[in-house]
Image (cartoon, helix red, strand yellow):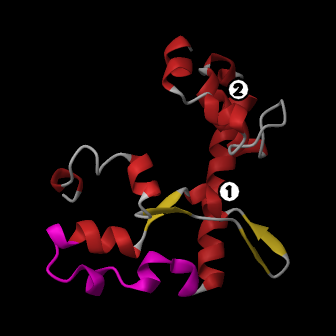
Amino acid sequence: EVWCRMSEVERDPAYLIRTGCLEKVEDMEVAGKRVLASRLGYRITRRFVNRFLGRIFESPAEVFDAPLLRPEVQDVAMFVDGVNNLLEAQEKAASSYIADGSIDDACPPLRAVLFCMAKGCTPEGHTICSPEVRALFEREHLMSS
């Protein structure tokens, strides 16, 4: 519903990131172990709630309070468990494409994502955040693949 009430400019991810309405979820360390929370991507912020959710909720800050926007502050152990479950499912699904050879039929961006999900990096050693992988998602590259 909220996307329908936003202009085309407001729906642009670059605009939302630039204006602080979306923030990247960062990896974290808990009990000496790295938690790959960045796999969650981006999340809405208080600024997004204030700017856009008032278009559909009378009191958006009441519905989307700080702990809801940052679940790791509610219960870090539960958050870590959820992230780890997600990573496990991603690894299992992506590994099946590698095991049966169907990854060879994937376009380059999908191939890179599948390797990152299964192994943490591409065969060339690039991670999902590497410029080489990010460039695969540029329009020109997508159209040529």
Q: Is residue 55 covered in magenta?
A: yes
Q: In the displayed structure, does residue 91 sit left or right of residue 78?
A: right
Residue at left 59%, top 30%? 110
The label shown at residue 88 is: 1
Tell me if residue 35 comes above or below residue 97 in the rendering.
below
Distance Cα–Cα, label 1 vs label 2 = 19 Å
**Which one is nearer the viewer's eye here, 68 or 93?**
68
62 part of magenta stretch: yes
- Secondary structure at badge 2 equals loop
Q: Is residue 114 above or below residue 83?
A: above
Residue corresponding to mark 2: 100
Q: Residues within 10 Å of mark 2 (few under 14, many from 20)?
A: few
Q: Residue at x 63, y 83 (%)?
A: 76
Q: Earlier in the sequence, mark 1 or mark 2?
A: 1
- Where 87 falls versus 34 (above or below)? above
| Residue 142 appears anywhere in the view | yes
